[in-house]
Image (cartoon, rainbow, N blue to C red):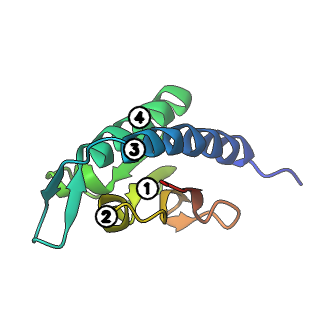
Amino acid sequence: MEDPWQKAYDFAVVVAKMVGEEILKAGESEIRVLTKSSTVDLVTKTDERVEKIVIGSLKQEFGEDAHCFIGEESVANGEPCILTDKPTWITDPVDSTTNFVHGFPFVAVSIAFAVNKQVCKKTKTILHNHCLM
């Protein structure tokens, strides 16, 4: 039996690889650091840019009305974090921002996909790791 969400999974892997390249390029240039809820809760312009690319790509492919989107940086900036039964994409655009900021080569793009409030078994989390050095 074919997985009805295989196309979604495949597309998310392509997006993760694409933004992984963006993160790699950003890690080679100046990194401007801001804070969210505390001095140890970091965010960079790269986090925000990569999240916009991930969510924008997914919206373009699957439609803004058919799927929902939850982004770590969007939620930190006040957007609601609502998980419904609709297919929902959840992303942490630069997973391990602290490593990214300090130039440690251990970061990832995290993209999860949930349907009926359950993370899909096959698409638990799509991670694309990139060395920054």
Q: Which of pointers 1 and 4 lies earlier in the amino acid sequence?
A: 4
Marks 3/2: CA–CA distance = 12 Å
User: Looking at the image, which residue is at 35% across and 52% down?
Assistant: 70
Spot the residue most to the top: 60
Residue type of the residue flagged with mark 1: Ile
Q: Which of pointers 3 and 2 lies earlier in the amino acid sequence?
A: 3
Residue type of the residue flagged with mark 4: Ile
Which circle, 3 or 1, is nearer the viewer?
3
Marks 2/4: CA–CA distance = 23 Å
Position in image of residue 20 (x %, y %): 52, 45
Would you call the spot at circle 2 few (<14 residues within 10 Å), some (14-19), or many (20 or more)? few
Q: Which residue is mark 4?
A: 53
Q: Which residue is mark 2?
A: 102
The disc at residue 90 is 1
Q: Nearer the viewer, residue 31 or 75?
A: 31
Quadrant for residue 40, please give it. bottom left
User: Looking at the image, which residue is at 89% across and 54% down?
Assistant: 1
Q: Which residue is mark 3?
A: 28
Q: Which of pointers 2 and 4 lies earlier in the amino acid sequence?
A: 4
User: Looking at the image, which residue is at 56% across and 39% down?
Assistant: 15
Position in image of residue 125 (x %, y %): 57, 63
Marks 1/4: CA–CA distance = 13 Å
Residue type of the residue flagged with mark 3: Glu
